[in-house]
Image (tube, rainbow, N blue to C red):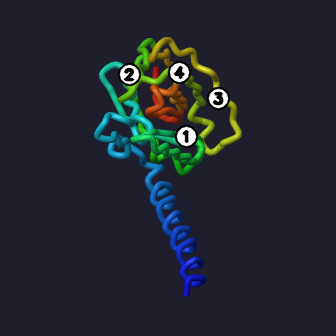
Amino acid sequence: MFRRHCMVVPALLAILSVMSLTACVDKMPGASEADTEIAQDGIYTSPPELVVTVGSSSVTARRGGFSWSYNIDGHETAIEADALHPLDEDCRELTPVINGTDIYERVNLDFQLPPDEITVGSWSAEYWGNIGAEYEVVEVNGSSFGLNTGEQIYYITAVWDNDGGRYHGSSTYSVVISSE
């Protein structure tokens, strides 16, 4: 009897683990502000959302893959989530778009929780579907950057250092901006 229970418990745990991972993966493609959770004590249990603003237009960027850890009452939890490449054709409909911006406007990145490091790259929209294409590095000044001409897919990576052991990690985001 004891031997049978020893085999059943690990099997049930494995099934529950797979089910919980599947739920996370299904949520990723359209991740939004509702997916950012904050524990009662102000600890982020997932990467913060990013609102991208150009002129008077704003969108919530599409969250991509991330690595996130947080500590609540001495219990460390780590999450690794993968996502489709920003240039994958399946992302075209999921990636938010800001149209008709002036090339001289600056893009402002407003994170729920300001990161310690931000990097940005861009591809021309002609690269949709070409996940092997190299992006052009975009110079970031604080939490803003200048636009490239035409319709561009912007890929943003943010890193949060260890906030006193409460949370840390990195996350990627994408948005399409069309400028003239």
Distance from Cα at disc 3 to Cα at disc 2: 21 Å
Quarter assignment of residue 59 = top left
Position of residue 92 measured from the top left corner of the image (x, y, whole percent): 50, 45
Q: Residue at x 50, y 32 (%)?
A: 168
Which-is-in-front pick, marks 2 and 4?
4
What distance separates the C-alpha of mark 4 from that of mark 1?
15 Å
Residue beneath the point at 53% across and 74% down: 9
Q: Secondary structure at mark 2?
A: strand
Any mark on residue 54, and which? 2
Q: Earlier in the sequence, mark 3 or mark 2?
A: 2
Q: Which residue is mark 3?
A: 135
Relative vertical location of residue 64 with respect to residue 106 in this rendering, above or below = below
SS for tag 1?
A: strand
Q: Is residue 66 left or right of residue 131?
A: left
Q: Is 167 displayed left or right of 38 in the figure? A: right
The three-letter amino acid code for the residue at tag 3 is Tyr
The quadrant where residue 10 appears: bottom right
Q: Going 51% across and 29% down the picture, which residue do you hit? A: 151
Q: Earlier in the sequence, mark 2 or mark 4?
A: 2
Amino acid at dot 1: Ser
Identify the disc placed on residue 117.
Answer: 4
